[in-house]
Image (spheres, grey):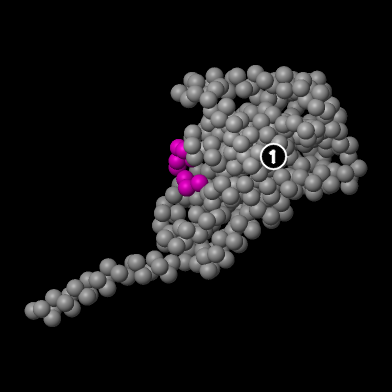
Amino acid sequence: MKRRSLLQGAAAAATLGTPLAALAQQTVTLKFHTFMSPQSNVWLLMHKPWMEKVEKESGGRIKFEGYPAMQLGGTPVQLYDQARDGVVDVVWTLPGNTAGRFPRIEAFELPFMMNNAEATSKAYWEYVQTVAPDEFKDTHVIALHVHGPGMFHSASKQIKTAGDLRGMKVRGPTRQVTKMLGSLGAIPVGMPLPGIPDALSKGTIEACVIPWEVVPSVKVHELTKFHSEFDGSGPALYTTTFVMAMNKARYEGLAPDLKKVIDANSGMATSAWLGKTQQGNDANGRKSAVDRGNTIYTISAADREQFIKQSAQIDDEWVADMGKRGFDGKKLLQTARDLIAKHGKA
């Protein structure tokens, strides 16, 4: 009887241990989906290196299938929900593609908030962890970052002052940026990045706002003739927030050691690297316009003040909107500014 009990116990232990042993040797293939083109700096210098680093550090037990340019279907607006619903495993996208859905992070998209993407990406990560931890509650967040200084690119005329925007149809990426464009006298047209080339070609828009880095990937240096950047001594016109997010169940189902690999390639340091890398490619984007013989104008610090003055109401409107949603907008905005300043000094 005793021998039989021992044998039965051993068999039960072996049965129970099988899933644990399998988990310890688990290999997974994760689908990574984004709207960025396969020729873009973001894909080649940010997304692919990140995936390769995770694969290497997992000893090949995590593998990625990368799908740029919405190759798995859907639209850029649907990317976040694809990760939430498990249609794909990891996405990189703009929260601002879905206007008003992630309201608290819009503090970073307000006019003239930043000029250093690395510092602002660190601030953005800390901000979400401390004052908006449930903003992306439907997914497992890997990284949060911003791009370098946003600026004007025009097919029809040089933009030197805020007055030059009056009546111009200008593309903006998020609701706060389109509001800003409206406050400056432009006719704002909201659309995801991939829509820019067609809109410029057809005259649906006369200009767009994007950072230098992304110019070549959407051929803006070929479709416009004039570029207007701000003097680097002060804050940039705007930036856009990004999120790299993973399906929650997929993350939770990983073996503990594979979770650690994902965790080691997540968080503030990864967010800062993404922001720094993206802004670091601004020079190449600018060169593409120079090489084509386009005209680049630098808006002076003095003229920037007029842009700031005319767009100041956007901050007040956002604070009021946050109040209607039950948040202390004034405190959120000040927190974002304080964190940007803090990480800018670090």
Report the number of numbered marks: 1
Residue depicted at x 82% and y 40%: 223
Residue depicted at x 54% and y 51%: 266
Q: Quadrant of residue 177?
A: top right
Q: Which x, y percent locates residue 227?
A: 83, 35
Q: Main secondary structure of the magenta part?
A: loop
Q: Quadrant of residue 53?
A: bottom right
Q: Is residue 245 above or below residue 158?
A: below
Q: Which residues are magenta?
A: 133-141
Residue at which label 1 appears: 116
Is residue 140 one of those drawn in magenta?
yes
Q: Nearer the viewer, residue 250 or 260?
A: 260
Q: Residue furthest bottom?
A: 3
Q: Nearer the viewer, residue 301 or 144?
A: 301
Q: Which x, y percent locates residue 277?
A: 69, 50
Q: Is residue 192 above or below residue 164?
A: below
The quadrant of the rendering that contains the N terminus is: bottom left
Q: Nearer the viewer, residue 74 or 294?
A: 294
Q: Is residue 224 above or below residue 322?
A: below
**Residue 224 appears anywhere in the view:** yes
Q: Is residue 121 above or below residue 174?
A: below
Q: Amino acid at mark 1?
A: Asn
Q: Dot 1, crowdedness within 10 Å: few (<14), some or many (≥20)?
A: many
Q: Which x, y percent locates residue 29?
A: 51, 62
Q: Secondary structure at mark 1?
A: loop
Is residue 128 one of those drawn in magenta?
no
Residue depicted at x 45% and y 42%: 138
Q: Which x, y percent locates residue 340?
A: 62, 35
Q: Is residue 6 left or right of residue 1?
A: right
Q: Residue furthest front?
A: 346
